[in-house]
């Protein structure tokens, strides 16, 4: 809400976006538990090539539905809502990692918190902005969020490739 300097997005909409993002993270964690063995990929390959696709699509659905229903007025609204979805997703994902890797050093948690928080928020915001711009320019084209989602998938995959160097990935 503090990021929305024009105060065009209702706080309740931001809360709904955060909750959707959190719910998407929980749902996708369950999907990944099933999907990873089904793909036969190791954890590193899965996080680089499969997780970015599933997670970015999951996060973009909420904003795409809002845009399709005419509930997003301006590009900045799309950015705020997209970032909120990504933030909700990142909070739950980081809580999951904390549960599984709680003994990791504090520096890793600081980098992870900043890195994934910005990553998930930014990729979903980009998908939302592109989706809104496409909807405004081409109202009959119903898949306007796809270019933004594709950008998010590539960006997310690159980030996951850089996790060998966490400090670099957080930038």
Image: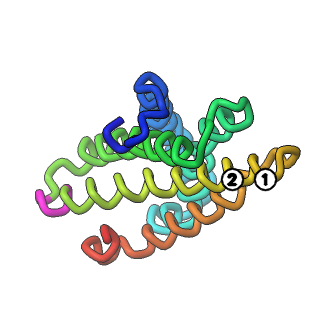
Which residue ends up furthest to the front in the rendered image? 6
In what element is the residue under mark 1?
helix
Placement of 34 over or under 53, stated as above or below: above
The question of residue 108 being in magenta is answered with yes
Quadrant in which the C terminus appears: bottom left
The question of residue 154 being in magenta is answered with no
Chain part drawn in magenta? 105-109
Name the one closer to the observer, 121 or 53: 121
Q: Do callouts 2 and 1 mark residues in contact (Cβ within 8 Å)?
A: yes
Give residue 146's quadrant in the image.
Answer: bottom right
According to the picture, the residue beneath numbered tag 2 turns out to be 133
Q: Around disc 2, counting alpha carbons within 10 Å, would you say few (fewer than 14), some (14 to 19), or many (20 or more)? A: some
Which residue ends up furthest to the left in the rendered image? 106
C-alpha gap between disc 2 and disc 1? 6 Å
Placement of 45 over or under 168, stated as above or below: above
| Dominant SS in magenta | helix
Residue plotted at (52% across, 68% down): 155
């Amino acid at each position: 809400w503090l990021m929305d300097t024009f105060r065009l997005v209702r706080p309740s909409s931001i809360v709904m976006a955060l909750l959707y993002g959190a719910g998407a993270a929980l749902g996708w964690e369950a999907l990944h538990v099933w999907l990873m063995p089904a793909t036969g990929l190791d954890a590193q390959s899965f996080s680089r090539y499969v997780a970015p696709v599933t997670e970015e699509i999951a996060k973009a659905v909420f904003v795409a539905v809002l845009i399709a229903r005419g509930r997003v007025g301006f590009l900045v609204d799309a950015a705020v809502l997209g970032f909120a979805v990504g933030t909700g997703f990142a909070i739950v994902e980081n809580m999951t990692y904390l549960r599984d890797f709680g003994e990791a050093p504090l520096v890793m948690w600081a980098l992870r918190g900043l890195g994934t928080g910005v990553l998930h928020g930014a990729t979903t915001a980009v998908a939302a902005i592109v989706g809104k711009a496409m909807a405004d320019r081409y109202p009959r084209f119903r898949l306007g969020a796809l270019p933004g989602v594709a950008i998010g998938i590539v960006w997310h995959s690159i980030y996951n490739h850089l996790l060998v160097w966490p400090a670099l990935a957080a930038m």
